[in-house]
Image (cartoon, rainbow, N blue to C red):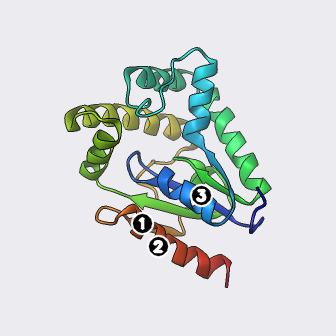
Amino acid sequence: METKNKNMVLCISGMAGSGKSTLSKKLAEIYKLEYHSGGDALKRLAYNMGYKIQTQGWWESEEGINFIQERARNLMLDQRIDSMMVKWGKQGGVVLDSWVISWIFKNGFKIWLEASKETRYKRIAERDNISFADAKIFLQAKESRTKSIYKKLYVFSLGEDFEPFNLILDVNILSSEKVLQVVRSVIDDVFLK
């Protein structure tokens, strides 16, 4: 795919259920950019290590939580994926969908999607066809362990330190279409004018 703007690098971050993957894929399509997901790259790594991967809700499954525990014991797993994400960012013409990219990649236009825990639990429950209570349990375990991994690796507090971001958008009451509309307006103003 030919990119519209080789200099455009969009880094989309937010906690699980904030809509970052949905937004990232739409932006990649609209601006004809490559799309790379840190979560997808980690899932491919898990698959290569023998984990059984399902498409929806894997991170919130017992198998996904076990992989996060393995990542906590072996920080090199995350460093390998993160260095790939940085490499893709340096090539330009890309949307990077990642919890951590905005802190470790010095360039790019960085967007944080902010959603309350309740909103995120509800979205994950609906997406993965699980109960709200189960979504809450899995997300709390996943996020606690993942925050610990990034704190050890990069000394920042995921979901608390917003210093690297150019745009922080509260998505609690916005539809995915409205989020896209707002973000496109900002990107067009920054890159295309």
Provide the secondary structure element on which disc 3 rests: strand
Report the residue marked by disc 2.
181
Q: Quadrant of the C terminus?
A: bottom right
Residue 35: image tag = none
Q: Quadrant of the N terminus?
A: bottom right
Q: In this orientation, which residue lies closer to the viewer: 53 or 71?
A: 53
Report the residue marked by disc 3.
11
| Relative horizontal placement of residue 117, taking residue 167 as reference (left or right) | left
Between the residue at mark 3 and the residue at mark 1, the CA separation in whole angstroms equals 19 Å
Callout 2 crowding tier (Cα within 10 Å): few <14, some 14–19, many ≥20: few
Between the residue at mark 2 and the residue at mark 1, the CA separation in whole angstroms equals 6 Å
Identify which amino acid the numbered label 1 is placed on: Glu
Mark found first going from the N terminus, 3 or 1? 3
How far across and down, in percent of the image, does residue 11 sit? 59, 58
Report the residue marked by disc 1.
177
Q: Residue at x 47, y 60 (%)?
A: 112
Q: Quadrant of residue 93?
A: bottom right
Provide the secondary structure element on which disc 1 rests: helix
Between the residue at mark 3 and the residue at mark 2, the CA separation in whole angstroms equals 17 Å
Identify which amino acid the numbered label 3 is placed on: Cys
How far across and down, in percent of the image, does residue 191 sit? 67, 76
| Relative horizontal placement of residue 191, taking residue 170 as reference (left or right) | right
Callout 1 crowding tier (Cα within 10 Å): few <14, some 14–19, many ≥20: few
Q: Residue at x 45, y 36 (%)?
A: 146
Closer to the eye: label 3 or 1: 1
How far across and down, in percent of the image, does residue 159 sit? 41, 51
Q: In this orientation, which residue lies closer to the viewer: 48 or 177?
A: 177
Q: Residue at x 53, y 21 (%)?
A: 73
- Eyeballing the image, is 67 above or below 169? above
**C-beta proximity under 8 Å, tags 2 and 1:** yes
Mark found first going from the N terminus, 3 or 2? 3
Callout 3 crowding tier (Cα within 10 Å): few <14, some 14–19, many ≥20: many
